[in-house]
Amino acid sequence: MTAINPVADLSRDGDIAVLTLNSPPVNALSANVRDGLAEGFKQAIADKDAKAIVLICEGRTFIAGADISEFGGAMKGASLHDVQAAMENSPKPVVAAIHGTALGGGLEVALCAHYRVAVPSAKCGLPEVNIGLLPGAGGTQRLPRIAGVEKALEMVTSGQHVPAKECLAMGLIDEIVPEGSLRDGAIAFARKIVAEKRPLVKVRENNAKVEAARGKPEIFQNFRKANARKFRGFMAPEYNIRCIEAAVNQPFEEGLATERKLFGEVMTGPQSAAQRYAFFAERQCNKIPDVPAETPTIPVKKVGVIGAGTMGGGISMNFANAGIPVTIVEVKKDALERGLSVVRKNYENSAKRGRFTMEDVEKRMGLLKGSLNLEDLADCDLIIEAVFERMDIKKDVFAKLDKIAKQGAILASNTSYLNIDEIASATKRPESVIGLHFFSPANVMRLLEIVRGEKTTKTVIATAMQLAKKIGKVGVLVGVCPGFVGNRMLAQRSREAQKMILEGAMPWDVDRVLYDFGFPMGPFAMGDLAGLDIGWVKENSRGETLRDVLCEMDRRGQKTGAGYYDYDENRKATPSPITEKIIKDFMAKAGTNPRTISDEEILERSIFPMINEGAKILEEGKAIRASDIDTVWINGYGWPVYRGGPMYYADQIGLDKVLTKMKAYQAQMGDAFKPAALLEKLVAEKKKFADLR
Ligand code: T1G
């Protein structure tokens, strides 16, 4: 075996050369890896006793893409394009051996091999769109030549990881080899194609599938139309589509040039910078300064959930999806049965959409057991309470759990803003109490705010963070304060939204500005969706607020066909003259003369107080870093990922601008806009939130 460089070595198995990469954590195409590939292929091709070459990787995965951490800096080392050319023009067969996830540049390298084999658990994808890019090493030109235009469009704009079986069916890989025997399987395959004198297949020369789509612009028009809502505001999906169009309408080399030009545009644009920031921000959340990575964790083999309502059911689904059995406890039989039937319906809907089979539904439902007795949770490793958002009820539940749960069990509350320390005080084991704040719908939203109490142990925290990843959530560790991070900042935006519609803006003005900013919907449309009567008690309602009046009129949101908006039978919203009149009556009663509020003011008053609250959260140590706050808002509240998150956005527009505006609004509207000390400090020091470590 010859060590080519620290991350690549070349060996021979009989007449087959084997070029092996080993560059943890994911064999990303760093300068070292590209150098190792360039030199490795040069030597393997020059080796006259080697009849074919296998490219394989050690560690968890085949090459998972370009090294994103290199972007933005000067590229060193061999060019990826030269490596690909060497592979494609090799006079002897090159076989890519895939395990884990061959993604981005990794798949683009594999597409320059003459053949590809993979183990059954392997997946392939071109997920550059998720970081605001497009496959910049020929992927948009080669993939449609193998998979066809429609499949290529779907893959490059969704970033999906396609399982090996499907890759085989579409011709993306040529053979599936036994799990755990990738090296032997790839070498045997290489030997076979040498013995059979199979051709040196160059993907770039397969034009049949792209020519079949030539003169059919409707393929692209229909695709754009069908995905307009999903792609709204993003640059990268459209740029990916244009590259696939180039593969259809231009010869290969010209298509490659188009891809290179468009890649340069997205790479240097603001959206990709924000999305690459968000990619690393999400992974930073796992790094907790006082909880080392090697902190021991508690095995969670059985989970208990108290409450089978919307949240309890959704929470339970997360664990069933990960193969972890759940016992769901309710107080009343009909509530339990209703809850379980909602879960079943959710699963069956997913099966109808082809996300999984009916067999999967039964497997998941088989992991969910209903019960009317808390005592049935005695052997659970983790118990999550998802009952009414009232401290007295939660403390009562935790006091009971303290007597029932086994020693060492983790007791978690799904509270969205209540004090975890106070809840923990109802038990004799505060060290085992933690907050697990799921976001509705709990089986869909990726964010999980993990709330550490004063006495929560590092083991419990480390277990919660690990479990978040296992159930496909983005776990962000936050501190105890009303609303933790997300809802505490949301309260700032909600307050200003409610004030602005009593100063002259209408709900649909505020919603439009935030929708155009990139949120999926504004606060009023969100209120109608969730229901305006959450926490509203009819008996106590005095018609003193707009929400009271709307609820008293049974205008409780989409579910009653009217809320802030009027809804038609398809739940299409239109601004309501009834709401407008109620607002005007409120203003008349208050003696307020309506004024025109500019879109700029609506946006600033919605977002700047949130940023300011984020600064206070950092001052108080309720979030570890600014990028954690951004991760909360992107994954829990629909902040447009191409704007990086509220704190990143503030850094981009300039903290001095935020401070100046906050002071101006404070002078006009009072101390709700009083700048946080940290904001003042950073501006004085000409620093950004990103400079905080
Ligand atoms: N570059 C650099 N570091 C990366 C990386 C990458 N491409 N992918 C992962 N990491 C780091 C990550 O930061 C973390 O580091 C560790 O690896 C484990 O990641 C030319 C231009 C591969 C599915 O977009 O989707 O190719 O926190 O926690 O959950 O056309 O990582 O441990 O220090 O996510 O098992 C295209 C991105 C790049 C793939 C593994 N490729 N990565 O998931 O582990 S652009 C991607 C992922 C490109 C070409 C274009 C996932 C994963 P640390 P992890 P995981």
Image: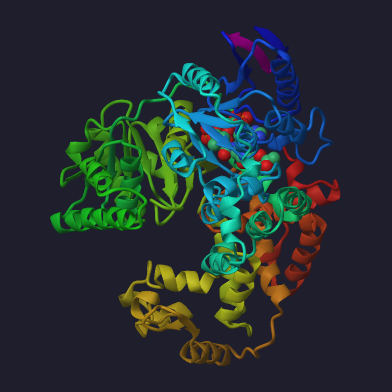
Q: Is residue 10 magenta?
A: yes
Q: Can you give x and y, in whole percent of width and height, for residue 419 in the image? A: 45, 47
Residue 295 rendering spot, x and y as whole percentages: 50, 22
Does residue 156 show up magenta in the picture? no
Q: Nearer the viewer, residue 254 or 206?
A: 206
Front residue of 587/657: it is: 657
Q: Quadrant of ligand 1?
A: top right
Compared with 607, 204 (above or below) is above
Q: Is residue 662 among the parts visible in the rendering?
A: yes
Quarter location, residue 660: bottom right
In the rendered image, the vertical position of residue 601 relative to residue 365, given as above or below? below
Q: What count of labels does the image hold?
A: 0
Q: Nearer the viewer, residue 423 or 288?
A: 288
Residue shown at 76% from the left, 23% from the top: 35
Outermost residue toward the front in this view: 197
The quadrant of the rendering that contains the C terminus is top right
Colouring convention used in this rendered image of the protein: rainbow
Residue range in magenta is 5-13
Magenta part mainly helix, strand or loop? Answer: strand
Q: Where residue 189 sits: x, y (%)? A: 49, 22
Residue drawn where x is 53% and y is 38% of the image: 124
Q: If the image is split into quadrants, where does the N terminus sit?
A: top right
User: In the drawing, does residue 546 fall left or right of residue 559?
Assistant: right
292 up-or-down from 660: above or below: above
Q: Point out residue 666 in the picture as x, y percentages from the top left corner.
A: 73, 68
Q: Is residue 480 left or right of residue 335?
A: right
Question: Image quarter for residue 142?
Answer: top right
Can residue 633 be seen?
Answer: no
